[in-house]
Amino acid sequence: MRFFLILPLIAVAACVPADGVTRDVPFGIDSRKDAVDGLTVGHRLMEAGEYELALKAYYRAAGETGLNVDTLSAIGSANLALGRLGQAEKVLQQALDVDPTFVPAMNNLGVALMESGKLGEARAMFQRAFAQDSGQTDSIRENLKLAIAASEASVYAEGQEQQEEGGLRLMRREKGEYVLLTEL
């Protein structure tokens, strides 16, 4: 009778490898070590231009640590890189709802708004990011310059269209003084 009790225990012990590797772990992976953080993996994949894989890594990070400002900002950035402007805008806005002072999310939301053609909102977002960052980041400064130039160009372009339609032209003479000209 004792022989029958010992035999199943020996059989079970023979099924578990001595080094702790099981069938559900891929070959070459040591499951005893800690995994690399999903955000770190995602950042490396973004640098390599693998945006879809980076997005998956960011989702994994969100599953491990929760939806915090870092994971939301990273997910939004990956969506932005993939050209998913609506999704990027939505997720980056969620990141700013969590932390309204997070400069990378502000900058990336400004880029998403700019790409969507929302120049005024993009300009305001870049101004917020620039103020929060105290003007220390060159990329934010450049984005703000581009947003200002694009928003002013669109205002002047609208004025040009009105000028061509109506035959009227507004000419600036001095500081705060304008003259309305017409072609007769």
Image (spheres, rainbow, N blue to C red):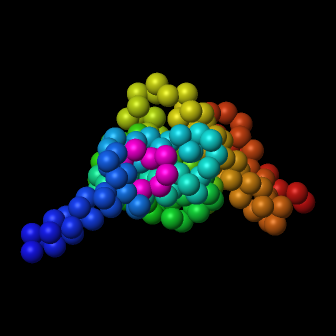
Q: Is residue 26 magenta?
A: yes
Residue that lies at the very extreme toward the left in this rendered image: 1
State the residue lying farthest toward the top: 136
Queried whether the magenta region covers residue 166, the answer comes back as no
Image quarter for residue 83? bottom right
Measured as percent of width and height from the top left, residue 183 is found at 88, 57
Whether residue 34 is situated above or below residue 16 in the rendered picture: above
Q: What secondary structure is the magenta-colored segment mainly?
A: loop
Residue 73 spot, x, y in % from top left: 42, 50
Going 56% across and 33% down the picture, which residue do you hit? 139
Give the residues in magenta: 25-31
- Against 128, is 16 above or below? below
Q: Is residue 97 left or right of residue 130?
A: left
Q: Nearer the viewer, residue 61 or 3?
A: 3
**Closer to us: 182 or 45:** 45
For the N terminus, the quadrant is: bottom left
In the depicted view, which residue is nearer to us: 45 or 160? 45
What residue is drawn where x is 47% and y is 55%? 26
Taking the spot 62% from the left edge, 57% from the top edge, the residue there is: 82
Residue 73 in the figure: left or right of residue 148: left
Residue 84 or residue 154, whichever sits in front: 84
Q: Is residue 41 left or right of residue 163?
A: left
The correct choice, above or below, for 104 with respect to 23 in the image is above
Q: Position of residue 149 (x, y in %)?
A: 66, 41
Q: Is residue 146 visible?
A: yes
Name the residue located 41 percent from the left edge and 48 percent from the top edge.
38
| Visible residue check, residue 39 | no
